[in-house]
Amino acid sequence: VREYIDDTEDYVNIQLDNQRNELIQLQLVLTIASFAINIETLIAGLFGMNIPCTLYDIHGIFGPFVGGTSAACVLLFFLILGYGRWKRLIGV
């Protein structure tokens, strides 16, 4: 009976370790996403400082600029995510 109890405890510990690892991977993905969003927020903050810039004088630049920075941040997210999977830090 004691051996059965030990085996059950080992099984429960393995399950808890698995859940912990999944939570760590989720935290890593959320941290990567947060980093990518913060890059775009930094760019928006720089343009919101009322510093003279030649981009302010170009008509119709807002849409392509925001689209380009958003696409770059999404690309950055997927690049870092791919690197994490390549290094086996994140499971598939």
Image (spheres, rainbow, N blue to C red):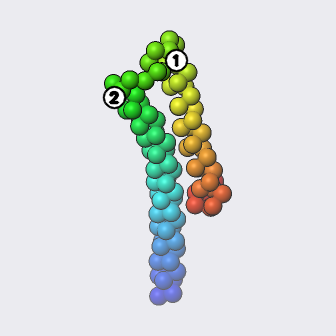
Spot occupied by residue 14 in the image (x, y as percentages of width and height)? 52, 71
Q: Are marks 1 and 2 in contact (CB under 8 Å)?
A: no
One can see residue 1 in this view: no
Which comes sooner in the sequence, label 1 or label 2?
Answer: 2
Give SS at disc 1.
loop
Residue ID at (46%, 15%) = 57
- Where residue 85 sits, quadrant-wise, is bottom right
* 25 in relation to 14, above or below: above
- Please tell me how crowded label 1 is: few (under 14), some (14-19), or many (20+) other residues with Cα within 10 Å: few
The residue nearer to you, when weighing 75 against 12, is 75
Spot occupied by residue 48 in the image (x, y as percentages of width and height)? 36, 27
As shown in the figure, which amino acid type bears the numbered disc 2?
A: Met
Residue ID at (61%, 46%) = 79
Determine which of the numbered discs, if any, sits on residue 40 in the image.
none
As shown in the figure, which amino acid type bears the numbered disc 1?
A: Ile
Which residue carries the number 2 mark? 49
78 on left or right of 3: right
Which residue carries the number 1 mark? 61
Outermost residue on the bottom side: it is 2
Q: CA distance from mark 1 to mark 2?
A: 18 Å
Give SS at disc 2.
loop
One can see residue 3 in this view: yes
Residue ID at (53%, 31%) = 69
Spot occupied by residue 82 in the image (x, y as percentages of width and height)? 63, 50
